[in-house]
Image (spheres, helix red, strand yellow):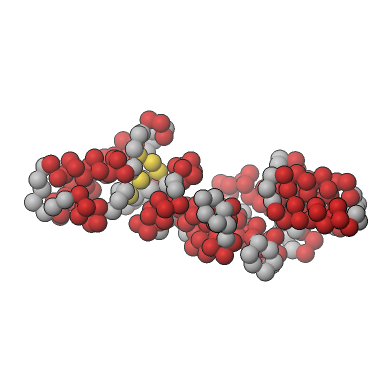
Amino acid sequence: MNIELLKEKFGFPLIYTPEDTDEPMRETMVLSEDKTIELYNGYLSENYESLSHIMLKLDRDLDKLFDSNFELEKEERPGINFIGDEKFLESCSLEKLFRLESQCHDGKIQSAIGYRFYAGIGVQQSYENALFWFEKAEEHSDFDARYYLGVMYDLGLGVQQDLAKARDYYYPVVPEQGEKVSEIIGAMYFEDVGCPENYPDTISETIAMSEKGNIYVQYKLATLYRNGFGLEKNKDKAMELYSKAAAAGLKEAKDELEKMKKDNKF
C-alpha cells in the first residue's frame, strides 16, 4: 500500500461534504494537497491492514476536521478551505478547478470555471465554453451562473441575443441575494422585455445601478440615452457611460463607443 493508491482510491486533494447538510455548495470542505498528503502519510505509518479500515478512519477524521474548522475564519484553518469561500476558488488554478469539479461536481466550482472562460483568466476567452459551464452550474441553482447566463443572452455574448431568455435567467429573484438581484435587474434592456407588475421604476433603478459602477448597467443605460428609450436622447451621456464601461474592460461598450465617434451621431 502506498500514497498513490490512496490518492486514486480516496481522491486528491480530499473533499468532504457532511451527509446532513442542506447547503452542500457552501459546506463542502477541501483540504490542501499538503494537508491531504499529511493525512495519507499518517495512515500509511499506522500500517492499516486494508483500504476499508482506512476509509472508516478517514470518514471520522474528515468529520472532526469539518466540525472544528467550519466556523473558523480562513486564516485560522490553514490547509482547509470551503467551496463557499469565493477567495479560495479565485485562488485555484484552472487545472485545480477541473480536478475539484471531477470529484464533487459542485455548482460553485462549475461557475468558477465558467467565469475563467468568460473573462479569459488563465485561458483563452471562450463564450462557448463559458456557456457550457454556466449551464451546468445553473442546474445546481448557482446564482452567479444564472447572472452571467442572463448577461450573455442580454448582450448576445457568444449566443443569439434573446432578451426574453435573459429575463428568465435573471428571475425569479433569490431573496437572500437582494443587492445582487437589484444589480441584475437594473442591467436589463427593458424596452423589449416584460417585467413583473410590482417592478420598481426601471429607469431610476437603472441609473442607480449605473452609479454603483456596474459596467453592464452602464452599457445598457448608455444605449437608452443613445436611442432615446425611456429617456431623452443625450449623446454626451451615452458616450460618457460607454467610456466608463469600456475603460472597465467591456468590449461591447468599446465597440459602441468607437461607432459613435466614427458616425458622430446617435
Question: Can residue 18 be seen at all in this image of the molecule?
Answer: no
Q: Position of residue 60 (x, y in %)?
A: 22, 45
**Residue placed most toward the observer, 214 or 230:** 214
The image quarter containing residue 63 is top left
Q: What residue is drawn where x is 58% and y is 57%?
A: 125
**Residue placed most toward the observer, 258 or 70:** 258
Q: Is residue 1 left or right of residue 255?
A: left
Q: Residue furthest bottom?
A: 160
Q: Position of residue 43 (x, y in %)?
A: 16, 44
Q: Quadrant of the C terminus?
A: bottom right
Q: Is residue 260 left or right of residue 246?
A: right
Q: Is residue 211 above or below residue 113?
A: above
Q: Position of residue 136 (x, y in %)?
A: 49, 63
Q: What residue is drawn where x is 11% and y is 42%?
A: 46
Q: What residue is drawn where x is 35% and y is 45%?
A: 30
Q: What residue is drawn where x is 88% and y is 46%?
A: 236
